[in-house]
Image: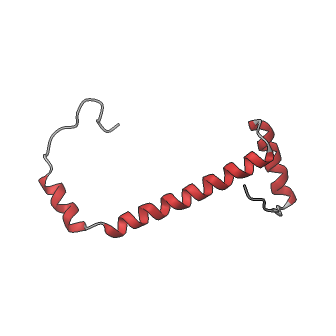
Amino acid sequence: MANYALRVPESLFSYARQVAEEEQVSMNQFFVTAIAEKVSALKTELYFRERQDRGEPIAFDAWLTASPNVEPMAGDECL
């Protein structure tokens, strides 16, 4: 486990403390969870960007053309 001294603006720290109390978690757990959520979001964005770069629009168009033109299954209708 690593330690890191974090400087946080007082207004943000106060709000974080309030949220941590509402969630009934420690400030440490709140900050660790917040960091994990941000890292996850950034990694997910990178994953989809890399997938997009590997995509081939011509192959996708061919796949769509080959797909059957049928009515949606029950429960899949557009609302």
Q: Which residue corresponds to the image point at 18% horizontal and 38% vertical from the top-left?
A: 71
In this view, the residue in front, 51 or 12, is 51
Side of 33 relative to 7 (left or right): left
Say above or below: 15 vs 53: above
Please state the horizontal and vertical placement of residue 66, each as a whole percent of the image. Answer: 12, 54
Q: Residue furthest top?
A: 74
The residue located at (25%, 67%) in the rendering is 57
The percent position of residue 10, horizontal first and vertical second, equals 87, 58
Q: Nearer the viewer, residue 63 or 5?
A: 5
Residue situated furthest bottom in the rendering: 53
Percent from the top left, x then y, of residue 63?
17, 57
Q: Quadrant of residue 56?
A: bottom left
Q: At 74% across and 47% down in the image, what residue appears? A: 30
Of the 4 image quadrants, the one containing the N terminus is bottom right
- Quadrant of the image containing the C terminus: top left
Who's the residue at 56% across and 55% down the image? 40
Examine the image and state in which quarter residue 7 appears.
Answer: bottom right
**In the image, residue 53 above or below residue 13:** below
Counting from the top left corner in percent of width and height, residue 35 is at 67, 55
Left or right: where does residue 46 sit relative to residue 22? left
Please state if 59 lies on the left or on the right of 31 as rendered. Answer: left
Q: How is the image coloured?
A: secondary structure
| Most distant residue in the front direction | 1
Number of callouts in the render? 0
